[in-house]
Amino acid sequence: IPYPNITFDSYWITSVAVDKNGHIWLGTKDWRMYLSEYIGSEWVIRETPDPAVGTHVYRIETDRKGNVWVSFENLVRYNTGEIYWDIYPASIYIDRDDNVWIGAEDGVWKFDGETFKHFDESDGFPSILMDVLTVSEDSSGKKYFGARGWDEFDNPRYYILTFDGNSWSYK
């Protein structure tokens, strides 16, 4: 695969994903270039569906349905052009059941293919945690999140948050 022939002065590749058709998606941090898609033998430059979502691609993930999920300043389902203005994602993860998990400034979101669920205190989500920066899953389906919160003196602290499908815990 050739490196994209791009003449921008400065850009960083921030995320790579491969969709179900074998297309490679690159996300970058640059004021002009947003997404590149490798189709067959060439790179195609893609722009955001709306410039207001920002220029920095934090993460790209693809699900089994063919959706391309992109974390800009807002969450975007790129192939449909849908922008979720109230979700400010730092990370995206597609679990083994094809659910989309989003780590965001205001905690954790889950999209089950039909609806979004924002986890909060009523779900047992710890109220001191915000800024969920990374998401992963182990072989049993347990989810792990890297998050930032604050201690009793309002100093930032970093935590490992887990969700077993029923309850949240953190250390």
Image (cartoon, rainbow, N blue to C red):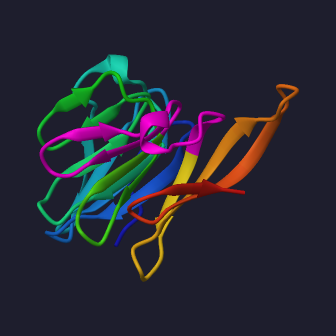
Identified at 22% across, 61% down, the residue is 63
In the image, which residues are magenta? 104-132
User: In the image, residue 52 lies at what x, y percent?
Assistant: 35, 16
Q: Is residue 115 depicted above or below 168 in this figure?
A: above
Name which quarter of the figure residue 66 lies in: bottom left
User: In the image, residue 50 lies at what x, y percent?
Assistant: 26, 21
Q: Is residue 124 depicted above or below 49 in this figure?
A: below
Residue at the limit of the structure toward the bottom, as seen here = 139
The answer to whether 158 appears left or right of 8 in the picture is right
User: In the image, residue 171 lies at what x, y percent?
Assistant: 72, 57
- Labels in figure, total: 0
The answer to whether 40 appears left or right of 27 in the picture is left
Name which quarter of the figure residue 148 lies in: top right
Q: Is residue 128 depicted above or below 41 in this figure?
A: above
Identified at 33% across, 56% down, the residue is 61
Name which quarter of the figure residue 144 lies in: bottom right
Q: Can residue 119 be found in the magenta stretch?
A: yes
